[in-house]
């Protein structure tokens, strides 16, 4: 049987210093059927740009105005 799809939601605000390492950590997991949703919550740094540059089709980046971690998490859940 096929592995179930696992969705990893990463709310991110001004996380440019950490987002690449976080994404690479998720992407090297042994479970291959996964998607990573990065919700850039109004960052003022290069968080979204770095996340988009990963170049893995399993990574999706959405940007929204700053609403806090709960709002970002809810956005990710709504996709």
Image (tube, helix red, strand yellow):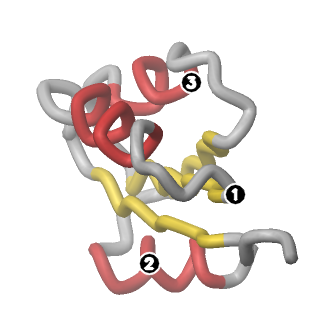
Asked which quadrant contains residue 31, the reply is bottom right
Q: Is residue 75 above or below residue 29?
A: below
Residue closer to the observer: 64 or 59: 59
Q: Residue at x 36, y 62 (%)?
A: 11
Residue 73 circle label: 2
Left of 14 or right of it: where is 55? right
Percent position of residue 41, x then y:
39, 56
Element type where label 2 sits in the image: helix
Percent position of residue 67, x then y:
37, 72
Residue at the outermost left position: 17
Residue closer to the observer: 42 or 9: 9
Is there CB contact under 8 Å for labels 3 and 1?
no
Percent position of residue 16, x then y:
22, 27
Query: If you read the primary sequence from the N terminus, does the residue marked by circle 3 or circle 1 appear first?
Result: 1
Exactly how many numbered labels are in the figure? 3
Q: Residue at x 13, y 26 (%)?
A: 17
Left of 56 or right of it: where is 21? left
Query: Which mark lies nearer to you, 2 or 1?
Result: 1
Query: Which mark lies nearer to you, 3 or 1?
Result: 1
Q: Residues within 10 Å of mark 1 (few under 14, many from 20)?
A: few
Q: Residues within 10 Å of mark 3 (few under 14, many from 20)?
A: some
Left of 24 or right of it: where is 52? right
State the CA–CA distance, disc 2 to disc 3.
18 Å
Percent position of residue 33, x then y:
69, 57
Q: Which residue is mark 3?
A: 52
State the CA–CA distance, disc 2 to disc 1.
21 Å
Residue at the outermost front position: 1
Q: Is residue 72 above or below residue 29?
A: below
Q: Which residue is mark 1?
A: 33
Query: If you read the primary sequence from the N terminus, does the residue marked by circle 2 or circle 3 appear first?
Result: 3
Element type where label 1 sits in the image: loop
């Amino acid at each position: 049987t096929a592995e179930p799809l696992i969705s990893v939601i990463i709310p991110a605000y001004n996380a440019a210093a950490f987002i690449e390492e976080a994404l690479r950590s998720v992407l090297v997991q042994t479970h291959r059927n996964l998607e990573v949703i990065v919700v850039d919550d109004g960052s003022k740094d290069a968080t979204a740009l770095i996340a988009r540059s990963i170049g893995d089709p399993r990574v999706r980046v959405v940007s929204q105005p700053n609403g806090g971690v709960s709002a970002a998490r809810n956005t990710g859940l709504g996709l």
